[in-house]
Image (tube, rainbow, N blue to C red):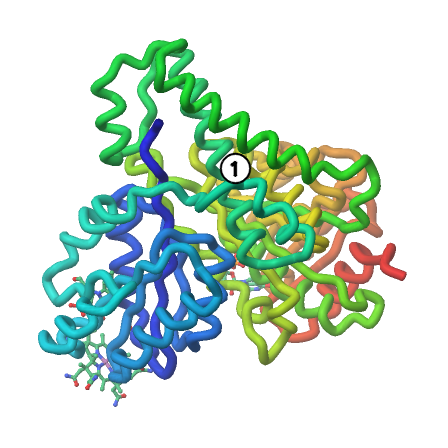
Amino acid sequence: MPGNKIRGFIGVKSNDGHDAAILVVADIMKKGGIEVILGGYDLTVDKFVRAVVQEGVHFAGISSYNGGHMPFFRAVRDELRRRDYPFLHIVGGGGATITPPEIEALEREEGIDKIFRSGEGHLVAPFIREHYDFPAVNGHPEDLLEGVLDGNELAISQALNVAEEKARLESALEKIKAGLDWPEDSRAAREALDRPLEKDGPAAKEVLAQVRRYSDFLSKLDAPAGESGTTVYGIAGRGGAGKSALIDELVLRFFKDARAGRKKCAILAVDPSSHSSGGALLADRIAYMYATDKNWVDVGRTYVRSVASRGHGQGIARALPDMVKILKAAGYEIFVETYGTGQPDSGIVGLVDKPVFVATPDIGGAAQIAKEEMLNLPGATVALNKSELPGARHVSSLLRGRVAEERLFLTTAIEHDNAGVNRLYRFLTEHYS
Ligand code: B12
Ligand SMILES: Nc1nc2c(ncn2[C@@H]2O[C@H](COP(=O)(O)OP(=O)(O)O)[C@@H](O)[C@H]2O)c(=O)[nH]1
Ligand SMILES: [Mg+2]
C-alpha cells in the first residue's frame, strides 16, 4: 500500500496571542510533506477539540507561551478521549516557557507524545513522519453509515477521511498503471517502492481492493437525483479576493435568517498542495471567524473541513465530489471554497448548485475579464468584492458587459452588515421558504 498522507491541526492555547511560532512550525510541517491546518490563537479547549474532530487529523499540535500549559495539554487530551476521538496524539511547544521537568512530566502521559524545545524545529517533521504514518480511517467504513446519516461529527469526519483516502489510492493506482512511482515520502511508500510496482502485482491488487471497499461504502450515501434537499454553494476566485471572508459573512447571515430554520451549514475549503513536498498549509479555517465561534453562530450546526488539492487542478480536490455527497447525506447546506490561482477554477461548476465568482477591482482590463472561465458561463453570478477600493466602478462597468445586472453584486466582505453582501445572500437563498 502507498504510505499514508499525514494531517495535523495546530493552534495556540486560550489566553495566549503568541501565534508567530505556529506559523513557523506550520511552514516546517508543510515543507516536511505534512498537511497542516492552521488554527488561530486564544483557542479554548472546546474550539480546539472541535477543530481536531472536524478535520479528522492524525495529530493535534498545541503552542503555549503564556503559562497554563500543563492543564491545557491535559484538558485537550481528556476532551479528545471523552469524544472518542480515535487518534490521541498531541505534540507541542512553547520555547523555554515549558520547563524541562514539565516536558518530562507531560511526555510521560498518555496521548501527549512530544514537546519540542527551542532549537528543535528541525526535529518536528521527522518525528511526525516517523510516528504518525498510519491510516486516517479507523475501523470499517460500513460502521460509519448510521452515524453519518444521524449527523454525528465523528462519523462524518471519518467518512470524509474515507473519501480522501479513496481519491488518494485511485491516484496511486493510476500511477502504478502508468508505470510511475507514487510521490509520497513516507516509510511505507519507500518500502513499497523497493518492490516492483507491476500493474497486476500484489501492491496494486491491495490498493484496488481498498478502493473498492471505500467505493462500496460511499455508494451507500448516494441520494436519488433531486432528493437531497440541501443546497451547495460554490465560491471561486483568485487567492486573496475575499472568498473566505465572504463565506463567513454568508454563514453569519444564514444563522440570523429565520427562513433557514434549524438547517446546518458546512464549509469545504480547498487550498493547494505543495508540488515539491506534497505537504500543504491549510489556512482557510482561521478566516472563518464567525462560522467557528460559538459567540456568533450555533457551532453545533456548523462543520468546517479543510481540504488539500493534492495535485488536482481547477481549484478543487479529487475527493471533493464524495466529500460533498457525505455532507449532503448528513443534511448540511454546503459552501465550497476553491483555491484560486488565477487559473480558471471552474472545476466546481458541475459540483455545486449555485456557483459564485469573486472578482476584485484589480482583476485587470477587458481582456483579463474575457479570460475568466466562470464569467463566460451562462447565468454566472459574480461578487465584485473589495468594492470600496478605487477602480471598482470601472471594473463593474466592464463586468456588466458579461454578467446580467441582477447577478452582479458589489460587496465589501470586511464591512459589517454590508448591503451588497446582504443582497447576495438574499439572491442565493431566495429558495428558502
Ligand atoms: C515574539 C514574542 C512576542 C510577540 C508575539 C508575536 C506573535 N504574534 O506571536 C509579542 C511582542 C506580540 C509578544 C507579546 C507578549 N509577550 Co511575548 N514573547 C515573544 C518571544 C520573544 C518569542 C516567542 C516566539 O514566537 N518564538 C519563536 C518560536 C518559533 O521559537 P521557539 O519559541 O523556540 O519554539 C520552538 C519550539 O518550542 C517549538 N514549538 C513552539 N510552538 C510549537 C507548536 C507545535 C505544534 C510544535 C510541534 C512545536 C512548537 O517549535 C519551535 C522550533 O524552533 C518570547 C521569548 C522567547 N524568546 O521565547 C516572548 C514571551 C513568550 N512573551 C512573554 C510575554 C510576557 C508577553 C506579553 C504578556 C508581554 C506584555 N506584557 O505585553 C505579551 C502577551 C501577548 C499575548 N496576547 O499573548 C513572556 C512569557 C513569560 C511567561 N510565560 O512566563 C516571554 C517568554 C518573554 C519573557 N521572557 O518575558 N511576545
Ligand atoms: N479591503 C477589503 N479587504 C477585504 C475584503 N474582503 C476581504 N478582504 C481582505 O482580503 C484578504 C483576503 O481575504 P480572504 O477571505 O482570505 O481571501 P481568499 O483567499 O479569497 O479566501 C484578507 O486580509 C481580508 O480581510 C473587502 O471587501 N475589502
Ligand atoms: Mg480563503
Asked if 291 appears above or below 242 in the picture, the reply is: below
Q: 157 or 310, which is in the foreground?
A: 157
Question: In front here: 428 or 325?
Answer: 325
Q: Is residue 394 visible?
A: no
- Which corner quadrant of the image does residue 399 belong to? top right
Residue 337 pos. (x, y %): 58, 49
Q: Nearer the viewer, residue 73 or 417?
A: 73
Residue at 54% over, 33% down:
214
Q: Relative to 161, is 9 above or below?
A: below
Residue 194 located left or right of residue 224? left
Amino acid identity at mark 1: Ala
Where's the C terminus, which quadrant? bottom right
The quadrant in which the N terminus is found is top left
- From the image, tell me which residue sits under label 1: 317
Task: Please give left or right for residue 219 compared with residue 203 in the image.
Answer: right
Q: Within the image, what quadrant is residue 323 found in?
A: top right
